[in-house]
Image: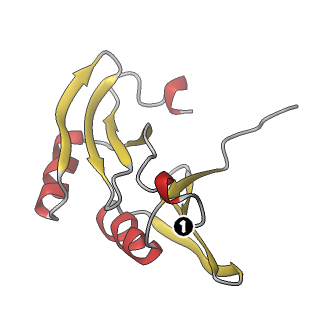
Amino acid sequence: MDIQRIAIVSVPVSDQDTAITFYRDVLGLEVVIDSEFAPGMRWVQIRTAVAGANFSLTTWGPPEAVGSLRGVIVQVDDAHAAADELREMGTAIVREDYDTPFGHFVEVQDPDGNGIALWEAPPGMENSAITG
């Protein structure tokens, strides 16, 4: 087996329209697909503008999966500025700015409670193996 890359990460949500509003209008991701793929089932795919990381906003999993996603890390140029911008838009910061040897982080949640960390790489690590 030769796995080439992670193609899509599924984000379990309760309402795709609410999720689209958050991921598009708050986080600035692009909606690339929004269409029915089976009766009563909708495929919503979003991605980051740079590097094209893809996410699918799913509603067809078990109800207990909604809001359970953790460990999604998105890279930003300035975590402090991103946190301030999110606060101004009414997004609650789950964990305030914190530093690690691998960079600066701010944690938020989508409307369903899925965890997203905003990551600012330390100098010299912007294009390292950790970012792909």
| Quadrant location of the N terminus in the rendered image | top right
The residue wearing badge 1 is: 59
* Most distant residue in the top direction: 101
Examine the rendered structure and indicate whether residue 97 appears above or below residue 49: above
Q: Nearer the viewer, residue 13 or 122?
A: 13
Q: List x then y, in percent, for residue 5.
A: 70, 40
Examine the rendered structure and indicate whether residue 50 appears above or below residue 126: below
Q: Taking 101 as reference, is 8 left or right?
A: right
| Quadrant location of the C terminus in the rendered image | top right
- Note whether residue 43 is visible: yes
Q: List x then y, in percent, for residue 52.
A: 56, 54
The residue positioned 44% from the left and 67% from the top of the image is 14
Q: Mark 1 packing: few (<14 Cα in 10 Å), some, or many (20+)?
A: many
The residue positioned 18% from the left and 47% from the top of the image is 93
Q: Taking 66 as reference, is 87 left or right?
A: left
Q: List x then y, in percent, for residue 50.
A: 49, 52
Q: Taking 72 as reference, is 92 left or right?
A: left
